[in-house]
Amino acid sequence: MAVPTVVTLQPQAVAVVTNAKPMWQTGLMDCCTDWSVCCCGLFCFPCLACTVAGDMNECCLCGTSVAMRTMYRTRYNIPGSICSDFCITSCCPVCSVCQIKRDINRRRAMGIF
């Protein structure tokens, strides 16, 4: 006669709760993470701005605007404010557009852009 199998431990469902908010994929000054984007931003800023605008299906003239940065940030729930977007875009437009382009490239590689 077969001996019955006794299960003493049942699998449990585990819920993982995280309070982590989505962030930018790279920092504002992280030029070393993608040299091609930074070189394009430094030597042909209008081209990079138009590329970013095109990636987001917007007018080429909007690539460097506060509205573009704010729209991108809110689309991916990245914390920030219009005031911070204004300050970043005004003080360092090249860094701002480069950060958006690096973020687009990384999200595209992950399949979430």
Image: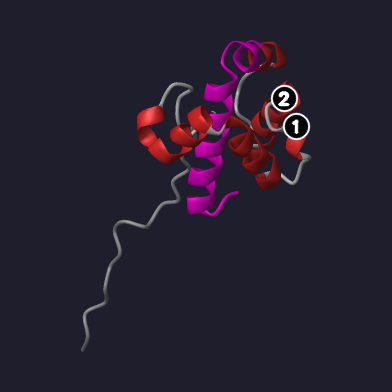
Is residue 98 one of those drawn in magenta? yes
Up the image or down, 15 lies above or below 6; here it is above
Q: Nearer the viewer, residue 99 or 8?
A: 99
| Mark 1 burial class by Cα count in 10 Å: few <14, some 14-19, many 20+ | some
Q: Position of residue 30 (x, y in %)?
A: 41, 26
Q: Position of residue 41 (x, y in %)?
A: 52, 31
Q: Nearer the viewer, residue 45 or 35?
A: 45
**Which residue bears the numbered disc 1?**
62
Q: Nearer the viewer, residue 25 or 22?
A: 25
Up the image or down, 33 lies above or below 81; here it is below
Residue type at mark 2? Answer: Ser
Up the image or down, 42 lies above or below 86; here it is below
Q: Position of residue 79 (x, y in %)?
A: 60, 22
Question: 26 left or right of 56?
Answer: left
**Which residue bears the numbered disc 2?**
65
Up the image or down, 91 lies above or below 104; here it is above
Image quadrant in which the N terminus is located:
bottom left
Q: Residue at x 60, y 20 (%)?
A: 93
Q: Which residues are magenta?
A: 87-113
Q: Secondary structure at mark 2?
A: loop
- Can residue 20 be seen here? The reply is no
Q: Residue furthest front?
A: 43
User: Are circles 2 and 1 on residues that touch, CB within 8 Å?
Assistant: yes
Q: Secondary structure at mark 1?
A: helix
- Can residue 94 be seen here? The reply is yes
Is residue 95 one of those drawn in magenta? yes
Residue type at mark 1? Answer: Cys
Residue 8 image-quadrant placement:
bottom left
